[in-house]
Amino acid sequence: MAQKPRSIRATAPRLGKALKRSFFDRSVHEVAPDLIGATFLVGGAGGIITEVEAYHHTDPAAHSYRGPTPRNQVMFGPPGFSYVYRSYGIHWCVNFVCEEAGSASAVLIRAIEPTHGLAAMRRRRGLEDERALCSGPGKLCEALGITIAHSELPLDRAPIALHARTEAPEIITGVRIGITKAVDLPWRYGLKGSKFLSKRF
């Protein structure tokens, strides 16, 4: 009988201080790399953020580039709120709104290392392998139970919790994935050496 993949991390790591909405009230290019190593939880399930992408309102690949719509309206509001959208009509993706109201910039959360609530995440994803649980924006939303109901929620209030990283990570950068515009911008950030990425840098 095949053995189930064993847990890579024996115990959940110590959580840093809770991040407040004010953390997001600055350039998206500062927030994005600062999120690497932070812990993202929804209803107590989640883990360490290992990969993100930055989207600025001047960026043709950003949903806000052509102005506000009913779908992206939250991006034009104050920072520190979630923006959830459906990708290709299949997968939910979660973003964190950054910069002052009207800027309409956000960080897409692409991958996390699962550390909390693994049983719930495995049940939602229907698999055991930790490395595959949250190795992509759609996968992590399914694992954390994120849907459109989680859009426009404050990032510092239940069911969402964000905790600062407890040590300075080594961060790598690269071009963003799955877009057709502004493809050369190095606005993808990742945790160097992590085995929990959506794609290698």
Image (tube, helix red, strand yellow):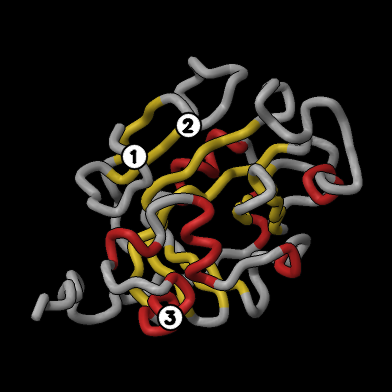
Q: Which mark is residue 199?
A: 1
Q: Nearer the viewer, residue 27 or 47?
A: 47
Residue 25 seen anywhere in this rendered image of the structure: no
Residue 87 seen anywhere in this rendered image of the structure: yes
Element at badge 2? loop
Who's the residue at 41% across and 46% down the image? 51
Residue 188 percent coordinates (x, y): 45, 33
Residue 185 percent coordinates (x, y): 51, 19
- The residue where tag 2 is placed is 177
Who's the residue at 84% across and 48% down the image? 71
How much space separates mark 1 and mark 2, taking CA atoms?
Answer: 9 Å
Q: Residue type at mark 3: give it.
A: Arg
Of tags 3 and 1, which is closer to the observer? 3
- Whether the residues at callouts 1 and 2 have beta carbons within 8 Å, the answer is yes
Who's the residue at 48% across and 61% down the image? 140
Is 8 placed above or below 30 here? Answer: below
Q: Which mark is residue 11?
A: none
- Whether the residues at callouts 3 and 1 have beta carbons within 8 Å, the answer is no
How much space separates mark 2 and mark 3, taking CA atoms?
Answer: 27 Å
Is 179 placed above or below 136 here? Answer: above
